Amino acid sequence: MLPQTIAMAFKAIRTNKVRAALTMLGVIIGVMSVVVLVAIGQGTTASVTDSIQGMGTNLLTVNITTRRVGQYGGYGGGPQGAAPAQPQSAGQQRGTVVLSLSDILGLEASEAIDKISPMVNGSVTVKAGNKNTTVSMMGVLPAYADIRNQSVQSGRYIVQSDVDNRSARCVIGAQTAEDVFGNTNVVGNTLHINGRAFQIVGVLESKGSSAGTSSDEVVILPYTLAQRMLGSTTIGSFYVSAVSAEAVTQAQTYVENYLYKRYQNTSAYRVSNQTEMLNTINETTGQLTLMLGGIAGIALLVGGIGIMNIMLVSVTERTREIGIRKAVGARRVNILLQFLIEAVVLSGLGGLLGLVFGWLLMQALRTMLNMTLIMSLGVVELAIGFSMAVGIVFGLYPAGKASKLRPIEALRYD
Amino acid sequence: MIEMTGIRKDYRMGDNVVSALDGVDLAIADHEFVAIIGPSGSGKSTLMHIIGCLDAADEGSYRFDGQEIGDYSEDELARIRGRKIGFVFQQFNLLPRMTAQENVELPLVYQGMRGGKRHRISETVLERVGLADRIDHRPTELSGGQQQRVAIARALVTQPALLLADEPTGNLDSRTGREIMALLHELHRAGHTIVLITHDASIAAQAPRCIHIQDGRVLAAADGQEVS
Ligand SMILES: Nc1ncnc2c1ncn2[C@@H]1O[C@H](COP(=O)(O)OP(=O)(O)OP(=O)(O)O)[C@@H](O)[C@H]1O
Ligand SMILES: [Mg+2]
């Protein structure tokens, strides 16, 4: 009986193709938007996750958030043999704690910590010939390259002697090199940064852009020189790499303990690891995906109501047909199934078409807008399942109505 | 096969009550051929719908094969309609989007019969009513008489014990009408119980037994054939 009923449903749909197409349109659009919007959400999550993992998995980011009033103990002389400074809580009770470079480099004493680099950054104008552009400038120690997975495609990175001598040397991002020189073959060229001449010693390997910001539009300077150029004397943030992913927690505890000893106040600093950052971001993008999916779900619901509408019209139109079928022996369940299957076939077919159109739209977005889009099997299953469910839910009422018609009344209907 | 006592059916139109059947007593035995005759509006079609379990009486008792119809559930009634009763409606009632063969097969579909067997049976029956060459035509592509014969084929396809025919010759010329009557006689000889509804006395005269109905009442049984 079931195969015959399914065949009947397909026949009914085939005899009224235009109406079937219009009925399905709502579901098609609904499923299409579910697929595409969720793909956008998941694509964003993936690219953000990628770029965070690209920063290095053993990374700890330390931000000092308190306002520092004092100006004592500058470190203009650069690292002094990196002797670990013993925190002296006495004499630092007046809320003006200043971390020195040797203070933070002293953290390397922990067996869990591999490398440490402070970082200052700001916006600068770079100029070569008659071309100029504004890029972000970072002042770092040589260790920064390893901590943040940076490497040069030509030349070399910042070295310790650059830092010690405040040499006017810089490493340039691939995109900035292209922008200013028109090519990346620029090692040895002179670049004017905020009007001062720098020698380019290296070009960074391109990392591509992520989440709108390009890590290729940058100039990297020796930490000491950058600090002087930006008029900065304190350490606002620094990066720590743990010896392994497993050692991250131990390294974090070590850094936090040290900072607490100095500040006696947990809100004066923030130490975050990549896992935490990933979790936070995944939570946010997860909510984004859910929200997009929800909006699309509403579209799908509206499509379902469209199906119910047409099915109700169809039941009324086919009242006589129902009467005839009952007169020749159709039971209620036969009529119910006939209309229900018709609704489910309509919505399921709409779901499949929506999937196809959604996939096409995704390809278009990918090539035209260069977006990261991910279509997961789960979403495909969900979309198909949901559209079938829509068919069942919204087909049930019209089908029930049809099955309850009294045979003689249905036969008399005109 | 059929025993009716005191069957009443009223149609209410606002304050107006039309008594379509006003206390009908009727008995039809197995293998009988009965004509029900009466003027237009006398309640013949209403009676046939009740006999065929398409409609329920307001009052009275109706036993079909010894069983009170009121005791059956809706699904059991559907089963009786599908297996024991064949209808030929006054207005054919064919499905317009289906071919002659698909229309004829419909009762078998609801018996759950497989396609191959259905096709064989429906072909045989369509052949029997002389439509072997019109199997794939839709009702709109058939003449009135041909549609009538498709409707008869559909009623016959399940080999029903009871065949109910409401004005089966009403739309036909006299020659085709005679052909249909011959077919009914043949079915009668084959053992089917036949109830034929008509308002044409010459058609009714061909039946061994004739029941007159007027204003919703049975007047007299012709030919003195009283049935237990
Ligand atoms: N659905 C209905 N609503 C109201 N009145 C009805 C309905 N069906 C039938 N009637 C009335 O019941 C009476 C009997 O109708 P029925 O159709 O049984 O007559 P009939 O004997 O078959 O007539 P005909 O020979 O013209 O087919 C008529 O007076 C008719 O007006
Ligand atoms: Mg009638």
Image (tube, rainbow, N blue to C red):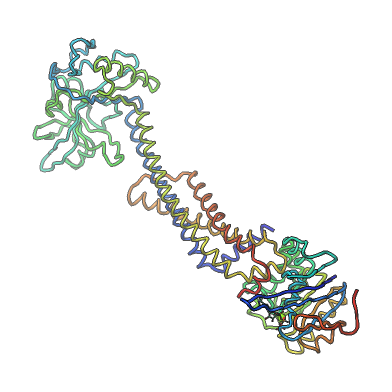
Quarter of image, res B95: bottom right
Q: Is A228 rendered above or below residue A405?
A: above
Quadrant of the rendered structure where residue B55 is?
Answer: bottom right
The answer to whether residue A344 is left or right of residue A45 is right
Query: Which quadrant: the N terminus of chain B?
Result: bottom right
Residue at 84% in and 71% down: B3
The number of callouts visible is 0
Between A409 and B9, the one nearer to me in the picture? B9
User: What residue sits 10% from the left and 41% below the top?
Assistant: A129
Q: Residue at x 54, y 59 (%)?
A: A346
Residue A76 on image: x %, y %: 13, 19
Residue B11 position (above or below residue A345) = below
Q: Is residue A44 left or right of residue B155?
A: left
Residue A9 at x, y = what percent? 60, 62
- Vertical placement of residue A70 versus A181, above or below: above
Left or right: A81, with B97 as reference point? left
At x 19% / y 42%, what residue is drawn? A179
Residue A288 at x, y percent in the picture: 38, 43
Q: Position of residue A325 (x, y in %)?
A: 68, 67
Q: Quadrant of the C terminus of chain B?
A: bottom right
Please tell me which residue lies in front, A176 or B118. B118
Q: Nearer the viewer, residue B173 or A216?
A: B173
- Image-based side of B55 in relation to A6, left or right: right
Q: Nearer the viewer, residue B129 or B187?
A: B187
Q: Can residue A146 be spotted in the picture?
A: no
